[in-house]
Amino acid sequence: MDFVATLQAAWRERNSLLCIGLDPDPYRFPASLAGRPEAIFAFCRAIVDATADLVCAFKPQIAYFAAWRAEDQLEALIGHIHTHHPGIPVILDAKRGDIGSTASQYASEAFARYRADAVTVNPYMGYDSIEPYLAWHGKGVILLCRTSNAGGADLQNLDVGGEKLYERVARIAATKWNSSGNCALVVGATFPAEIARVRALVGDMPLLVPGIGAQGGDIAATVAAGQTAGGFGLAINSSRAILYAGSGEDFANAARRAALLTREAINACRAPRT
């Protein structure tokens, strides 16, 4: 099953638009994991196992693994999700951006080495920077569009022939670049008006929406702006607010409680499911 179909099935089967970002910070781990060589894997596995029935996707951030020389633990974690929680897509948050043979290597890294179902990509170098990812049949390519950081406006809101640059990216991504049908866009929860504008431009294309939780994005405004008819279309990401909901040995249970509350808050704002 391809990425978009898998995500759509997860929305329905788990009644969830919640994506949990896996951004492991060993300085915030409970004492029992201190000094363990596989601490990053153990921490993330516990979070995954505690929350898998509540989410539509998991999104490991590659830098949080690479900075600790824990790429092998990232491979093991994605393998664990595929084996023990089939049907939950894994989005590798890598934000790669390059052209030609280098982009091909990044695509192979994401899809062959890590076996991710989708990867985040920076499209601001143009079509030839994303084409190598589109060549991987069934894999998702999630393009940065209107990012959640304040500085994103420096470039993404520039006028380009009567429309903003992020609008141009959204429009092209939904048409010329989406030949595989597996493209999606990143649009930050901190800018609900922009979410609504992107939704109007791209129809039912999935949107990965970071920015709730620690970044302060409003859930009700996000859902109202970005949901499709029937209450789907979004993978709303929360990372730190769930991962570090508790600091003790019951951290996984605390994460589950936070994830459940977040999913319920999202669902309370959704249109009736059809």
Image (spheres, rainbow, N blue to C red):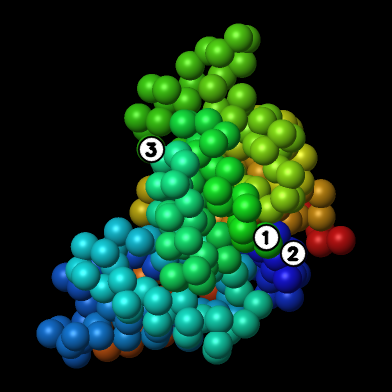
Q: In which quadrant of the rendered image does the C terminus lie?
A: bottom right
Say what amino acid the circle numbered 1 marks: His
x, y percentage for residue 189?
A: 51, 44
Q: Which residue is mark 3?
A: 149
x, y percentage for residue 74?
A: 37, 74
- Is residue 19 left or right of 246 when viewed as pictured? right
Residue most extreme to the right: 274
Label 2 vs label 3, nearer the camera:
2
Q: In which quadrant of the rendered image does the N terminus lie?
A: bottom right
Look at 74% across and 35% down and name the residue there.
175
Does residue 100 appear in this view?
yes
Residue 243 in the image: above or below residue 84: above
Say what amino acid the circle numbered 3 marks: Asn
Residue 88 occupies quadrant: bottom right
Name the disc covering residue 137, or none: 1
Residue 59 in the image: above or below residue 199: below
Name the disc covering residue 5, or none: 2
Q: Nearer the viewer, residue 241 or 154?
A: 154
Secondary structure beneath label 3 = loop
**Distance from the alpha carbon under mark 2 to that under mark 3:** 29 Å
Look at 20% across and 68% down and name the residue there.
68
**Distance from the alpha carbon under mark 2 to that under mark 1:** 13 Å
Look at 55% across and 81% down and name the residue there.
82
Label 3 vs label 1, nearer the camera:
1
Q: Tag 1: Cα neighbours inside 10 Å, few (<14), some, or many (≥20)? A: few
Residue 217 in the image: above or below residue 45: above
**Who comes first in sequence, dot 2 or dot 3?**
2
Q: Tag 3: Cα neighbours inside 10 Å, few (<14), some, or many (≥20)? A: some
Say what amino acid the circle numbered 2 marks: Ala
**Who comes first in sequence, dot 2 or dot 1?**
2
- Is residue 274 left or right of 118 when viewed as pictured? right
